[in-house]
Amino acid sequence: MAERVKVTIDGISIEVDAGTTILNAARLIGGDIVPPAMCYYSKLEGSGGKCRTCLVKVSKGSDKDPRPMPKLIASCRTGVMDGMEVQNITSPEVVEARKGIVEMLLLNHPLDCPICDQAGECKLQDLGYEHGSEGTRYEFERRTFEKIDIGDKIQLHMTRCILCYRCVYVADQITDHREHGILGRGDASEISTYIEKAIDNDFSGNVIDVCPVGALTDKTFRFKNRVWFTKPVDAHCDCDKCSGKVTLWYKGEEVLRVTARKDVNGEVESFICNTCRFERKNTSEWTIEGPRKISHHSVISSNHYELANPPAVIRKNPALKEANIEEFERVTRH
Amino acid sequence: MGRKLLLENINVPGINSFEVYRKHGGYRAVEKALKTMSTEDVVEEVKKSGLRGRGGAGFPTGMKWSFLAKPEGKPRYLVCNADESEPGTFKDRYLMTHIPHLLIEGMIVASYALGAKTSYIYVRGEMMPQIRILERAIAEAKAEGFLGKNILGTGYDLELYVQPGGGAYICGEETALIESLEGKRGNPRIKPPFPAISGLYNCPTVVNNVESIAAVVPIINDGAEEYAKLGIGRSTGTKLISASGNIKNPGVYEIELGVPVEEFIYSDEYCGGMANGKRLKAVVAGGSSVPILPANLILKLTTGENRLMSYESLAEGAFASGTMMGSGGFVVFDEDQCIVRNTWNFSRFYHHESCGQCSPCREGTGWMEKVLHRLEYGHGKLSDLDLLVDVAKKIEGNTICPLGDAAAWPVASAIRHFRDEFEWHVSHAEEAMGRNYGLAHYADPLPKAETIAAN
């Protein structure tokens, strides 16, 4: 049994296992005090510390050494100590610093949300909305790149990239050989494959799911539909390469895309293989489990199941039909 | 004339060869340390000497050594940081070019103290001649039995390697240096863990500047007490200063810490005064990363006392009126220099050298560079000044490594102390393209500190 330590975040105390990071402790508490994280990904070893959006103030180091930490620290990479006191949204310093970082992240971002496939499920949109200011003070030309196809199923649009390095860690850790990394440095650095060599690997599609912005997109879904017009449905299949647990995104009766299931923190529950992601787009290949619960904060939750006359895909499937009735009753009661 | 410890024999012909170096008392420290002292003794001696890191941060070297973890079955490493790339600093190159055996001697003693069996000298890639000089010196020392297996019959083995870097400024940051040494992209690591616990190949590692390691030699030779007698307060010993800019005699000087700044600039022993009869406008005292100070603040403290060349005195007044010792890159500006242009030039450097790993530094350095470029070329706005201060504040302290701070400080301090000149660049944009702002009031005596009458 691991040692338990007590940490207080914005006045809320919680006991966690020793070695837990501040961010993960905050996630256990949940709610508004969870620092945003653009680069940290709990399933990717070594990720985090780069985007600096999760900066927090440690006002008391620990019971043993109560000195505060001199600088704001990245909560995703700092372990908790017994008796540590952390300020996140209660510290004006943190709020101010985070605002600055959001502005920096958006500095070279094209803000082409109206034509971006990620819109609606983009972490940067959420971040900008929750922690940013309305305008930017940047008055110069933004950096741009040509779009690059990496493999026949994935497109890389570096212009939108915020260099979180998540896809690099996926390529390093999930796929079996590394062909994908960073070229250049500073604000001229870019994600690239080795001399634009196509990523040819069964798990390469996961770079799409981990990308917090629209830099890596699924070419089989590009420009097909806005995500908030599609309906997420959990399904599984017998896959010999991966867990086979996915979310299908329906428009009418057609499966427009397949992604891994994402939890409340926007992280995938388990990585899926390219066959499931790109090849299996018929309902008949899947066992439907039921509608995917989407946080009501998300624009995607405006996909209503509660229709008096549900479309055929719902009518034919008992699980979805059940969900429709539930939702319909819940909504019409008000 | 101050006492010289490192550069004492620098003018002896052939001092770069083993033979001459040995004849002038070289490698005595190795004999003394390996034959008569235990490893703890050496660490204790360095601790007592009060030697502080000469690379920039000024962290006590002995303390750093004593923090090194000593787990069973894991090798420990000593890495010498010779990736000197700070604009305005060239002391390590000078030392390595002319007296390479001093560094090697220091490396042997320091490696022995830390129990390292393999040590590296990470040299900046552009310094090809120095790499060859060091490799020759290592071969000579090895032939004489000072390196390799069973050094001087004491049973201590040490292999010393020179590793050229790729020439990136960021690789002077210790964790980026370690990454680069491991053959990876030179991105700084996120700390903790610190290198003393998990550094090179995940083993405990100490990274020291060239000058810090060289300074171990006189400490062992003469004893810590003798070394600590030099200097002032907690700034003990001597320091190499790379003096450059509009002075009569630019070059590398070894000073005893505590020399007044005024004496350093104007005495013939050191810089020899301003060149061409111009007047002093500003000084960057410790390499491009430290805050720039106008003439009146660099010569005197706000209390009216003389500012001294020491870690404490240069930092006196913190960011409001002080600067830092840094790596000792002493850049002097006369009245003809444009501070706006210089600040732009520095920020251009940091924009180019940012590794791009964390967002405030990656985006912020480029932003500051563009705004300063606009100011310098006459398209600036008055609001740009506050914008720059704000951007600098958003970068400072929020990054993975100190490069963010190093990029923010010169900009913030230039605007703090030379705001008039920046404003003039906006209000007289056309004139600013043709001539410089000049000295203005930057050398005026400081206003007397107000004393509140007690009654």
Image (spheres, rainbow, N blue to C red):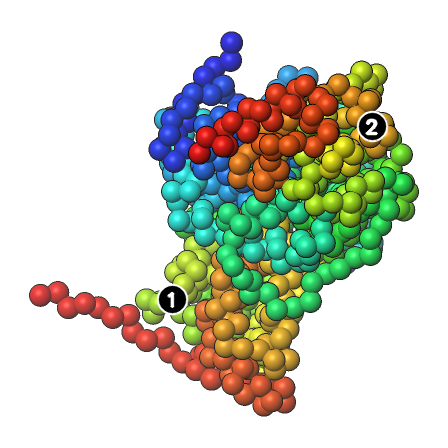
Give, as a three-letter code, the residue at label 2.
Asn
Task: Identify which residue, B106 or B442, lies in the foreground.
Answer: B442
Q: Specify whether residue A144 is in view.
A: yes
* Label 2 sits on residue: A282
**Mark 2 element type:** loop
From the viewer's perspective, is B403 left or right of B49?
right
Host chain of mark 2: A
Say above or below: B72 vs A64: above
> Residue at image x 78%, y 34%?
A254
> Residue at image x 66%, y 47%?
A119
Give, as a three-letter code, the residue at label 1.
Leu
From the viewer's perspective, is A204 left or right of A294?
right
Q: Dividing the image into 4 quarters, which one contains the C terminus of chain A?
A: top left
Q: Which picture quadrant has residue B452?
A: bottom left
Host chain of mark 1: B
Q: Specify whether residue B216 is in view.
A: no
**Mark 1 element type:** loop
Q: Position of residue B140 (x, y in %)?
A: 83, 41
Gap in Å between the C-alphas at discs 1 and 2? 78 Å
* Label 1 sits on residue: B301
Q: Residue most toward the front?
A: A309
Q: Residues within 10 Å of mark 1 (few under 14, many from 20)?
A: some
Q: Position of residue B176 (x, y in %)?
A: 68, 43
> Residue at image x 82%, y 30%?
A281
Q: Position of residue A37 (x, y in %)?
A: 57, 39
